[in-house]
Each structure stands twice: as structure tokens, then as C-alpha cells.
């Protein structure tokens, strides 16, 4: 298995490309932008995008879908039944998606948005905006912030400490780091 | 990171460690290896390419990583002492929770890296591009960041003592503790 991070300089977001070691059908997570650089990354590694996972339907995470679907016939998986008017397969908490050689667990983490999802596979966790290095997502109200923190602590922090975090923005992290060092989540931190 | 076991959990950790050193010194390109909890001292690893490697909880002293090209490499909760990363290209590298003492990251591109909660002392980042790197809740003491690109660099919740930002675009860095995502 190979994983690639592609950084969009227009929306400052991360797109993740997951594929088998020797090319073939691949998974793209949060195509916030689809440009020549991402196309080259996919093609150079011999991949065909068959599955698109969406952590939440904010522009910085979905804007590349229009171009992507002109090139690849891919299925979209998200909380919502449509993404940018394209049909998507709605997924729910606890569901396991069998996408090629990958088995990916869906974790609902509402708070930043109603449709926020994380995707968990082995020791990899794709968190969208929910949890990023040293930060948590923005929320509209204190109640939503409490909901977000509850989502993180009850559903993500119960995973193994050695789990690698690949967020929708910013650098990667590990669960051990966020548990011990995230100023918004350290024990004793005010939930807001 | 694909390796099933980190060194202390191998049947023969000493042999595993020797094997790891041989891999690091003997290969120019190092991919998908888990070297967590390794102890390295006075090693020359300059000019290596590392992708998806894990050195979490390691002890690295006097290691020369000059001209390192690294992407998605984890140095979290490490002790790094007298290590040099001069003229390196680091993307999505993680130094969170580490103790960084007398290390040199100058003349490097350190993009989208994570130094969250690290304790960094007597270290140098001069003339480096630190674009979008996060120093959230980091302790920085006697650290040189002169003539650095600080665009989208985050220092929220950080403790800065005797940090030299001369000639750097400090106005482009984020110091607001509540600065979040849009």
C-alpha cells in the first residue's frame, strides 16, 4: 500500500491518494482541487481513481470532483447523498467500506459540520477538519464545540495511540501527540 | 511505517538495531520503515531520501541529516541533540513532543511540518522556508529564525524566549491562540 499527500495551494487543503504498491485502482480522499500536479501523481504511479471519499462537503475538500469525474469513473462516498450535484453513496458510522484491497471504517464526528466523517484504516486515520495537528475544527456555537470534542474523545481517542493522523489541513500527527499535546484537548482544557 | 514491530518488540532488539543502522547508512532511498525507539549516535545520514518513515520516541545525537529529503517522516517524542538538518527539504515531517537541543535546520525548506509541543533550545532555522509549519504549544528558547519565510506559520499557545525573527516576515505568521480553520 502507498499513501501520498497532495497539498492544494489554493485552499491550503490536503488530498490523499491511497493505492496498491504496484498501481491499479486507487482511493482519493478529499479532492479539494484537481490540477496537473495531482493528475501526474496519479498517472505516474499507475493508478486509476475508482473511489472518492469525502470527509465533509466544504469547498476546500470537494472542488476537484468536477474535473476528476471527467477523467475517471469513480464512486463518491460521503455522509450526503449528493456532492456538487453528483450522486454519492451515503455512508454511516461504523460502516466498513471494502474498496479494492482496502477496508476502511467510517467514523461520524459531527461538530464542525453535520456531515463530518473520519476514515480509519489499520493505523491510518483521515480526519478532515475534525482534528488537525494541535487544533480542532472551527464550530459555529459552543454547543457544537462540545459535540466536536465529544466526538474526538469518544470515537478517535479510543483508537490506538500509534495511529497516524492525516488531516484535511496542515501537517500530519499521531493520536498520542494530540492526546498529550493538543491545547484544545489536553485533559483539563475547557471544553468551550 | 508498514513494519509490524518497532525495535524493542523484536526477538533480538540489538540485532534489529544493527540491521536498521545498516539500512539507514547503506541505502540512499528509505521508504516505509518503522524505526521507532531507535538510538542513533554520531551517524552520517546526509543526502538521504526518506518517505513514510517513523522514528517516534527515538534518541538521536550527533546525527548528520544535512540535505535530507523527507516526506511524511515522524520524529515525534524524540530526543534530538546536536543533529544537523542543513539544506534539507522536509515536507509533512513531524517533530511534535520532541526535545530538540542544539540542532541546525538552517537553509532548509521545512514545509507543512509539525513541531507541536516540542521543546526546542539553542537551535537554528536561519534562512529557511517554514511555510505552513506549526509550532503550536511549542517551547522555543534561544532559537534563531532570521530571514525565514513565516507565511502561514502558526505559533499559537507557544512560549517564545529569545527567539530572533530578524528579517523574517513575522506579520504573515499566526500567533492568535484561537486561530482556526475556515
Image (spheres, coloured by chain):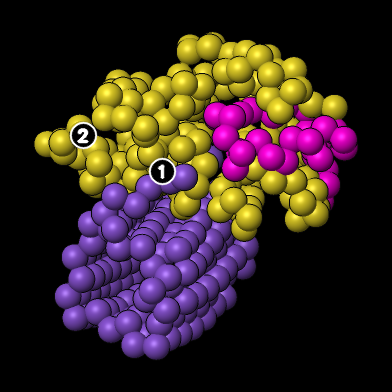
Q: Give the color of chain A as drawn.
A: yellow
Circle 2/circle 1 CB separation < 8 Å: no
The residue positioned 53% from the left and 12% from the top of the image is A92
Q: Which residue is mark 1?
A: A132
Q: The C terminus of chain A appears in which quarter of the rendering?
A: top left
Q: Up-down: is A110 above or below B154?
A: above
Instruction: Looking at the image, tell me whether mark 2 or mark 1 is earlier in sequence order.
Output: 1
Residue B125 placement (x, y as % from top left):
38, 79
Q: Which residue is mark 2?
A: A192
Chain of the residue displaying label 1: A
Q: Up-down: is B7 above or below B126?
A: above
The residue positioned 24% from the left and 37% from the top of the image is A185
Instruction: Residue at the far front: name it.
Output: A141
Residue B148 placement (x, y as % from top left):
43, 80
**How far apart are the alpha carbons under marks 2 and 1?**
18 Å
Residues packed near mark 1 inside 10 Å, few (<14), some (14 to 19) or many (20 plus): many
**Region rendered in magenta:** A43-72
Q: Up-down: is A114 above or below B79?
A: above
Q: Quadrant of residue A101?
A: top right
| Left/right of residue A174 with respect to residue A83 in the rendered view | left
Q: Quadrant of residue B26?
A: bottom right
Chain in purple on the image:
B
The residue positioned 48% from the left and 13% from the top of the image is A93
Whether residue B4 is visible to the viewer of this picture, yes or no, is no
Q: Is residue A65 magenta?
A: yes
Secondary structure under tag 1 reads strand
Chain of the residue displaying label 2: A
Q: Is residue A169 magenta?
A: no
| Left/right of residue A104 with respect to residue B59 in the rendered view | right
Amino acid at each position: 500500500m502507498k499513501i501520498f499527500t497532495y497539498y492544494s495551494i489554493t485552499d491550503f487543503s490536503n488530498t490523499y491518494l491511497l493505492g496498491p504498491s504496484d498501481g491499479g485502482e486507487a482511493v482519493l480522499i478529499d479532492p479539494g482541487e484537481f490540477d496537473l500536479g495531482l493528475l501526474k501523481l496519479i498517472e505516474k504511479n499507475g493508478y486509476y481513481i475508482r473511489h472518492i471519499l469525502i470527509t465533509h462537503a466544504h469547498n476546500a475538500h470537494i472542488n476537484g470532483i468536477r474535473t476528476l469525474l471527467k477523467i475517471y469513473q469513480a464512486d463518491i462516498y460521503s455522509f450526503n447523498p449528493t456532492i456538487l450535484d453528483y450522486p454519492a453513496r451515503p455512508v454511516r458510522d461504523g460502516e466498513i467500506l471494502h474498496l479494492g484491497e482496502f477496508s476502511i471504517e467510517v467514523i461520524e464526528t459531527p461538530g464542525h459540520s453535520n456531515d463530518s466523517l473520519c476514515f480509519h484504516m489499520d493505523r491510518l486515520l483521515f480526519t478532515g477538519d475534525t482534528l488537525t495537528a494541535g487544533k480542532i475544527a472551527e464550530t459555529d456555537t459552543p454547543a457544537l464545540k462540545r459535540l466536536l470534542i465529544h466526538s474526538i474523545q469518544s470515537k478517535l481517542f479510543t483508537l490506538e495511540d500509534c495511529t497516524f493522523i492525516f488531516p484535511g489541513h496542515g501537517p500530519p500527527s499521531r493520536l498520542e501527540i494530540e492526546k498529550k499535546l493538543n491545547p484544545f484537548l489536553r485533559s483539563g482544557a475547557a471544553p468551550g | 511505517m508498514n513494519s509490524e514491530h518497532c525495535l524493542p518488540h523484536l526477538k533480538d532488539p540489538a540485532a534489529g538495531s544493527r540491521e536498521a543502522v545498516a539500512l539507514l547508512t547503506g541505502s540512499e532511498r528509505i521508504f516505509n520503515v518503522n524505526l521507532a525507539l531507535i538510538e542513533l549516535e554520531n551517524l552520517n545520514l546526509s543526502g538521504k531520501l526518506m518517505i513514510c518513515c517513523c522514528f517516534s520516541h527515538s534518541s538521536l545525537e550527533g546525527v548528520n541529516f544535512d540535505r535530507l529529503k523527507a516526506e511524511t517522516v515522524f520524529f515525534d517524542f524524540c530526543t534530538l541533540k546536536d543533529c544537523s538538518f542543513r539544506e534539507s527539504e522536509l515536507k509533512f515531517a513531524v517533530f511534535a513532543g520532541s526535545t530538540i537541543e542544539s540542532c541546525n535546520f538552517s537553509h532548509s525548506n521545512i514545509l507543512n511540518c509539525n513541531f507541536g509541543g516540542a521543546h526546542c533550545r539553542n537551535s537554528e532555522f536561519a534562512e529557511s522556508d517554514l511555510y505552513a509549519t506549526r509550532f503550536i504549544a511549542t517551547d522555543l528558547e534561544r532559537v534563531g529564525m532570521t530571514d525565514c519565510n513565516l507565511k502561514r506559520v502558526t505559533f499559537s499557545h507557544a512560549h517564545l524566549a529569545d527567539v530572533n525573527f530578524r528579517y523574517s516576515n513575522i506579520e504573515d505568521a499566526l500567533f492568535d491562540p484561537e486561530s482556526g480553520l475556515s
